[in-house]
Image (tube, rainbow, N blue to C red):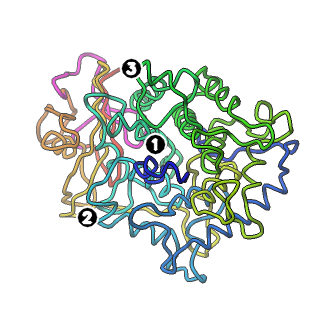
Amino acid sequence: MPRTTTARRAALTAAAALGAFTLTTLSAAATSTPAQIATSTTNGVGYLKSLQGPDGSYAGSGLSNEWAFSAFAATGTAAVDVAPGGDTTKNARTVYRNLLSTGSWPSASPVVTDYERATLNAYAAGIDPARVSTSRNLVADIYAYWQNAEPGYFGPSANFNGTVFAALALNGARTTTDRIRIPQSLRDAMINRIRANQHNDGGWNFGKAEGNPAQLATDGDVDMTGAAMAALCVSGVPATDPDIAEAKAFLKNKIIANTGAFDAMYGVNTDSNGWAVSGLNACGINPQTGDFVTSRGKTPVDFLISQQFNPGGGFKYLPTDTAPQAYASIDGLRAVAGGGFTAAPPVPTTAGAPRWVAQSSLASGTASKFALTVDDGTGTLKVCSVTLTATGATTTLGAVVDAAAGAATPSGCVTGVTPSAGTGQVTALNGKANSGSITWKASVDGAAFTTAARENTVAIGDTIALRLGA
């Protein structure tokens, strides 16, 4: 994390996809060879393991090292395999999951990026972010910050980074069966806002620029450009899209010939370069070929590796630093390893450890949250987090809709449903009634839309989408 940008990254709580967040294959013809990248990765993983607390922790209150999980996943290292002194009872995944499950996490005054950061890192650690525990659904936690007055934004629109990382988290943290869990209408709403905030020079910054010609005319920021590129690409925007091409040109114009570093807003540093490279990786743009090989034969990956202490494996933040820095090491390693801002967890090597962990059922008498979208086909998308106290191991769509009508965050997600009790097909919702082949349909976790009926079973952590259409 750039030291000069601590305040804005604290708002992101250190905010830091390859379409499906897969790793980018680097060309053997690139300046940094596959062998050099492999050595950098091995040493970098060793350094990140040294950051683990004696209790197995990486995360805690305030600004902490949990972004290590995204870097570990990019290198093929399972978080459950990382344990202090080999004590598997203190493995990093279990300790992190326990932290996220506590009522006191993240703080008394949380912001949306707390939940976005946790979603990206829980996913990378092999924790289903929608099913962390009976009472913790990180996807629903993010939904609670939807802006009804400015649809498509999550959190105050002035902090544009909250929307960028919402797109990264909600699109990147797929289900355990590798399915995007949110509906296309929500993806489109975020894409539209990200596009609208692209500056005239092709870059982005952490603050809102949409609708403000003066702000759009200001300089973009290297790191936020990387994050916004990744957000678009993981949302399904192709690398050939004109906005991605403009962002690529922006980064190309920032590269320094002698080193391969990007000339960031706050100077040359590992974190900004790491975010930019991760953005390129996320869009499938090789940072070691074409436009990103300088006239001196240097690439951004060359610069990142030059920032690494070996064999210690840590990365320094500034070229003039004489010691490694944790955040620089995380951002640098993730980028060198070919990662975006999260990745699916590797298969563990620890005997008996599953690739994924998740709460399997609701608990009677315990409040749980559900992520709900309502699309009536008029372009007015409703997004909310619904709290429901279950009476059994599962619940029903009718119970979730009823709970949303009573209280949801933000409010107004559901104003009325027909029938209002019992079972049967939903014939009207929010004043919009079925008409011929145009009927209310439901989807769970990104599955195909089918007839919405009150008795439809809903399980813990299900991301529910309701849509009026054919």
Q: Residue at x 52, y 24 (%)?
A: 199
On the image, the x and y values in percent for residue 135 come to: 29, 60
In three-dimensional space, the C-alpha distance between marks 3 and 1, rounded to whole angstroms, equals 21 Å
The residue that disc 1 covers is 165
Q: Is residue 116 above or below residue 330?
A: above
Number of marks in picture: 3
On the image, the x and y values in percent for residue 410 come to: 22, 39
In three-dimensional space, the C-alpha distance between marks 2 and 3, rounded to whole angstroms, equals 46 Å
The image quarter in which residue 442 lies = top left
The residue that disc 3 covers is 211
The image quarter in which residue 402 lies = top left
Q: Residues within 10 Å of mark 1 (few under 14, many from 20)?
A: many
Q: Are marks 3 and 1 in contact (CB under 8 Å)?
A: no
The residue that disc 2 covers is 363
Q: Which residues lie in the magenta part?
A: 429-455
Q: Give the camera-side residue of 423 and 172.
A: 172
Q: Residue at x 64, y 46 (%)?
A: 22
The first of marks 3 and 1 along the sequence is 1
Q: Is residue 241 above or below residue 66?
A: above
The first of marks 1 and 2 along the sequence is 1
Residue kind at label 2, given as amino acid type:
Ala
Closer mark to the observer between disc 2 and disc 3: 3
> Horizontally, is 433 left or right of 175 in the view?
left
Give the residue at the far right of this rendering: 29
> Horizontally, is 46 left or right of 439 in the view?
right
Secondary structure of the residue carrying numbered label 1: helix
Q: Residues within 10 Å of mark 3 (few under 14, many from 20)?
A: few
> Horizontally, is 38 left or right of 132 in the view?
right
Closer mark to the observer between disc 1 and disc 2: 1
Secondary structure of the residue carrying numbered label 3: loop
Closer mark to the observer between disc 3 and disc 1: 3
In three-dimensional space, the C-alpha distance between marks 1 and 2, rounded to whole angstroms, equals 31 Å
